[in-house]
Every structure is written in C-alpha cells, then in structure tokens.
Image (tube, rainbow, N blue to C red):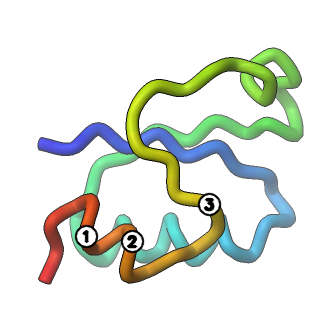
Amino acid sequence: MNKVLIYSTNTCVFCKKAKEFFKEHKVEFTEIDVGKDIKAAKEMVNGKIVVGFDKPALMKELKIK
C-alpha cells in the first residue's frame, strides 16, 4: 500500500482537493499542517513529491485508473 504524507495548511485549496481525492479513492494519508509546524515545513522528504493538486500525477503515483 502507498504511504501518502501531505504537507498542508488550513487555507490551501489544492491541499483540500488532494485530501478529498484521497478519501474518494480510499487512499490512507497522514496530514502535516505546516502552518502550525515550522519544523515540518523545513524537513527533507524522501520519495515522490507532487506539488499542488495534480490529479494525473496523483493517479499515476497511486496507480489509480
């Protein structure tokens, strides 16, 4: 199973769309609110990074048809 980590803020429209997409496709995710956690905003991330709500990229990475 894919492990999805989403760095978001309360005001990010793209983050909200991505989280709705994950829920719709039953993709488990962990959310980190970088508006409240400055350290997390600066941390390095391994793996594939998708910026914004790029539906085709998300579908490809999560193997959703």
Determine contact: label 2, label 1, CB under 8 Å.
yes
The residue tagged 2 is: 57
**Residue at screen point 41% across, 44% down:** 48
**Drawn side of residue 55 relative to residue 16, left or right:** left
Distance in Å between CA atoms under marks 3 and 2: 9 Å
**Drawn side of residue 63 relative to residue 8, left or right:** left
Residue 36 lies in quadrant: top right
The residue tagged 3 is: 51
Q: Which structural element holds mark 1?
A: helix
Check disc 1 and give the amino acid type: Lys
* Image location of residue 5, percent across then percent down: 47, 39
Check disc 2 and give the amino acid type: Ala
Q: Earlier in the sequence, mark 3 or mark 2?
A: 3
Badge 3: residue crowd in 10 Å (few <14, some 14–19, many ≥20): few
Q: Nearer the viewer, residue 59 or 30?
A: 59
Q: Nearer the viewer, residue 45 or 40?
A: 45
Distance in Å between CA atoms under marks 2 and 1: 5 Å
Say above or below: 28 vs 65: above
